[in-house]
Amino acid sequence: MASITTNASIASFGGRFLKLTHTSALTGGPMNFTLFLPAGISEASPAPLLIYLSGLTCTPDNVTEKGFLHAHAAPLKLALLYPDTSPRGSDHPGEHDAWDFGSGASFYVDATQEPWASNYKMESYITKELPDVVFSNFKQLDPTRVSIAGHSMGGHGALTLYLKNPGKYQSVSAWSPISNPSGCPWGEKAFTGYLGGNREEWKKHDATELVKHWRGPLNALLDVGTADNFYKQRQLLPENFVEAAKAAGVEGLELRYQEGYDHSYFFISTFGEDHVRHHAKHLGLL
């Protein structure tokens, strides 16, 4: 069993937030994550798990304190896992110089370019190492019922990891996802730095490209605010993702434009119940 350290235990909505740390072999150092365990779950009656991937600059604390997803998950007996957004403390040259690259901005890929390739292995961390740590330590969670969600860069992560791992997750949702990173400034900067200049390699980490090869229903819910400045600046490009899905004949995708909403946690918390219930339905809780 992988060793973890409990840094805090906080009661909320009848359940508990556990702020945890473990040493990651993939990232080469300590990684923080937060787990919400609702009341009334046990090894005999394990809870399904929703993984939430945060956006640029965020830590697990942002969504814990501002997202309020647990208020809706608690009565459904749905557990929540909030990973960190990058390795911390590796101090590569330039790692902390920009808010949209390096620390807090992994884009949930396994980097192939040095120095990032040595420990920026967040795709493998999110899909393999962290779940193994969580399920080996918390037997009251059901490893056969897992879904994934995210916001902004985390929405990109949720969509791509869902599309790259058919059957691993029962459903996916995203608020303001970076839906076509190969075609926006954020994605071009991150992919060049982490993956190099070969755009064919970028397609393997771009939801708009990946959805073209999807088979079966998508089980996806996306929300985008019409007052989101990043949407207006064409950093998100959800319309490209929807068009690619439609051209490929993919069904089961719902994109909702929410009038007047921005990119913030006010937006996330407003539509959090819809996203929790979307996953609860596909996880057999509704």
Image (cartoon, grey):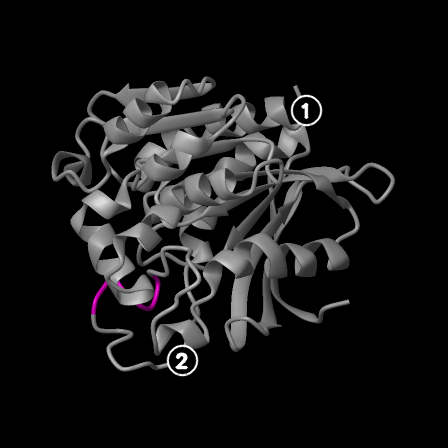
Would you place residue 126 above or below residue 115 in this image? above
Residue farthest to the right, as pictured: 44
Locate residue 193, reporting x and y percent: 26, 66
On screen, residue 231 above or below 185: above
Horizontal relation, residue 170 to residue 120: left or right:
right
Q: Secondary structure at mark 1?
A: loop
Q: Position of residue 246 (x, y in %)?
A: 35, 19
In the image, 44: left or right of 237? right
Amino acid type shown at disc 2: Ser
Residue at left offset 47%, top offset 65%: 121
Frontmost residue, 219 versus 29: 219
Dot 2, how many residues are within 10 Å of its Cα: few (below 14), some (14-19), or many (20+)?
some
Judge whether residue 157 is colored magenta.
no
Residue 100 visible here: no
**Mark 1 packing: few (<14 Cα in 10 Å), some, or many (20+)?**
few
- Residue 285's label in the rendered image is 1
Question: What is the span of residues highlighted in magenta in the rendered image?
Answer: 98-104
Is residue 148 at all visible to an observer of this figure?
A: yes
| Residue 203 position in % (x across, y down) | 34, 46
Residue type indicated by callout 1: Leu
Residue at horizontal 57%, vertical 49%? Answer: 81
Q: In the depicted view, which residue is nearer to us: 181 or 273?
A: 181
Task: Give the image quarter of residue 34.
Answer: bottom right
Q: Which residue is mark 2?
A: 90
Q: Quadrant of the N terminus?
A: bottom right
Q: Main secondary structure of the magenta part?
A: loop
Q: With 248 as the anchor, is 172 left or right in this view? A: right
Work out whether residue 149 or residue 67 is closer to the camera in this orientation and state it: 149
Q: Is residue 183 left or right of residue 92?
A: left
Residue at point 36% right, 35% down? 175
Quarter of image, res 242: top left
